[in-house]
Amino acid sequence: PTTDDNTCVPVTLLIAPAVDSPVMQEEIFGPLLPLIKVSGMKEAIEFVRKRPKPLVTYCYSPDPQAWEAFRLDTSSGNLAVNCGPQRMQGNFNAGFGGAGESGYGYSIWGRAAFDDYSHHKTIFKGKKFAGSV
């Protein structure tokens, strides 16, 4: 993100914010990334599962098994593995959207957004009136 005078506003890491603090209770619209230290993969997955579905779940781990566990055992609009918001926001070829309280739909930009908001409709047509009731 940039300011009016085109200076960059870097991502600000929020180290171990209180779980009941406002930044952990509301959706964040800004370059803020709360970091929560956990004892391991299972605790991290439980932390995500106990809360409303986030727009993005971030998994920072060198272990491919952790990546797969996050993919299978959490639900969110997007999953980021070992990358932050800038990587996703700069990729206009990939869909990006929410799930549950974080929003509905697949994307807010690029071809995926066009497809999502075009409301594609599948039409089934038989050869005869009521031919396959």
Image (tube, rainbow, N blue to C red):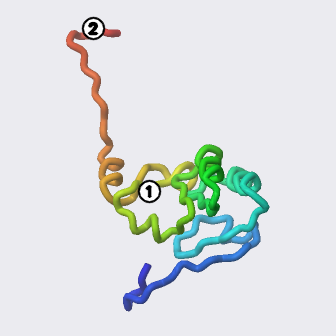
Percent coordinates x, y for residue 98 in the rendering: 50, 53
Percent coordinates x, y for residue 46 in the rendering: 74, 52
Residue nearest the observer in this picture, 115 or 94: 94
Q: Earlier in the sequence, mark 1 or mark 2?
A: 1
Q: Residues within 10 Å of mark 1 (few under 14, many from 20)?
A: many
Q: Which mark is residue 86?
A: none
Q: Quadrant of the C terminus?
A: top left
Report the side of 104 relative to 108 (left or right).
Answer: right
- Identity of the residue drawn at 63% across and 61% down: 62
Percent coordinates x, y for residue 50 in the rendering: 72, 52
Report the side of 114 relative to 69 (left or right).
Answer: left
Q: Quadrant of residue 58?
A: bottom right
- Which residue is under mark 2? 131
Q: Quadrant of residue 57?
A: bottom right
Amino acid type, callout 1: Phe
Secondary-structure class at tag 1: loop
Percent coordinates x, y for residue 42 in the rendering: 75, 52
Q: Residue furthest front?
A: 63
Q: Residues within 10 Å of mark 2 (few under 14, many from 20)?
A: few
Q: Residue furthest bottom?
A: 5
- Identity of the residue drawn at 69% across and 50% down: 49
- Which residue is under mark 1? 96
Whether pointer 1 and pointer 2 mark residues with C-beta atoms closer than 8 Å, the reply is no
Q: How many marks?
A: 2
Amino acid type, callout 2: Gly
In the rendered view, would you say 105 is above or below 12? above
- Identity of the residue drawn at 44% across and 56% down: 96
